[in-house]
Every structure is written in structure tokens, then in C-alpha cells.
Amino acid sequence: MLTPAGERVLSAASELFYREGLNAVGVAAIAEAAGVTKKTLYACFGSKTELTVAYLRSRHDVWWAYLEERLAEAEAPRALMVFDAYVDHPKLGSDRGCAFLNAAAELPAGHPGLDVIRRHKAAVRAKFAELIREDAPGADDPERLAEQLFLLVEGAVAHTGIDGDAHRVTLAREIAGILMRDTREAGAR
């Protein structure tokens, strides 16, 4: 459980890391944005590495809770809601693309943040497979379709950061809808 100062540090770091990049933001800028001293930042997180890991875990937790909320309200095929959740979260930005892919591009091999990123991506892919199995029970190969949808969303969201808008996510969602429809129709035969 974070102290109020720790919450402010994590909030400031989250905004700065996403907007400017992990390597471009130093602890002095984070401390200043959080209204704390560097000593307080280090007392809360120990190191920039630990703060980076906390940022990635927090971003996963916040996004995942939102995804589950959206899925609970969605109609089949719910896998399409994953595309929506990537770009319409009310609190997390998406105009710079995927925070996890951006972070992965900056982190050196062996950084503990990479484990958080790998777990996040594996969870998204597994969620696709789960939703496909539930919403298209006759699917020939739900794991393959999950991989296809995962690659569609990953590529489209990566381009959000390049293009500055989510039009490719919308297109990828349309393609995913066609794949899901074809799968459901094949399973109904």
C-alpha cells in the first residue's frame, strides 16, 4: 500500500513515462511533478527501476479492471471489446500507442519491467482465447484465432502512437469481426 506521497509519485511518473518515455524522464522531474523531494521518491520506491515496475503494474491493473468491466456489459463476440478497451479508457491515454510496447522498446534485457510487460501481453492473448472459446464454442482452433486477434490489436495499437489516432484500431476491429463471424458460422455448421 502506497503512502499519499507514493501515490503522487506513481501518478506523476505514470503521466510522464507515458507522454515522454521512460528514459527521457528523470527522477528529479518526477519528484518535482509529484511535489515531493527525490529523497521521498526513493523512500517510496527505492529506485527508478522499482518505480518503472510499479508504473507498469499499475497501468496493467487499471486497464485490466476497465477491460473486465467492459466485457461484463458486452455482447458476443466479446473479443471485439478488447480492441475498444485499448483506445477508449477514460483515464489512460492511448494517443502514444501501447504503453507496454513503448516501455519494452526502452528497457534493457533483464530489466524486471520486461516481466510485467510479458505477463500483460500473455494475459491479453489468453483473454482473447477465453472469449473465443466462450463466444464461439464450435471454433476449430480458438488458440490460432486468439493469436490472430492479438496480432491485429497489437499492430493497430502500435500505430496509434505513430498515426496519432485510432483509425487503424477501428480497421483491425472490423477485420477481427469478420474473423469472429466466419468462425461462429463455421462452428454452427
Image (cartoon, grey):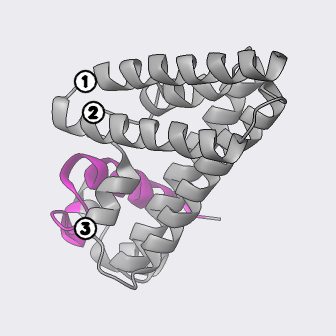
Position of residue 123 measured from the top left corner of the image (x, y, whole percent): 63, 53
Asked whether residue 25 is drawn in magenta, I would say yes
Magenta segment range? 2-29
Label 1, residues with CA under 10 Å away: few <14, some 14-19, many ≥20: some
- Nearer to us in this view, 42 or 77: 77
Quadrant occupied by the N terminus: bottom right
Q: Where does label 2 land, which residue? A: 160
Residue 45 horizontal/vertical position (percent): 46, 76
Tell me where residue 91 appears, x and y as whole percent. 45, 32
User: Which image quadrant: the C terminus?
Assistant: top right
In the foreground, 127 or 132:
132
User: What amino acid type should be assigned to the residue bearing mark 1?
Assistant: Asp
**Left or right, residue 135 beside residue 77:** right
Type of secondary structure dominating the magenta stretch: helix
Residue that numbered label 3 is attached to: 106
Q: Nearer the viewer, residue 116 or 33?
A: 116
What residue appears at the point 19 percent right and 52 percent down from the top-left corner?
A: 20
Asked if the residues shown at circle 3 and circle 2 are in contact, with their CB atoms under 8 angstroms apart, the answer is no
Measured as percent of width and height from the top left, residue 77 is found at 69, 20
Q: Height in image: 28 above or below 154?
A: below
Residue under numbered circle 1:
165
In the picture, residue 156 is in which quadrant?
A: top left
Looking at marks 3 and 2 on the same chain, the residue that comes earlier in the sequence is marked by 3
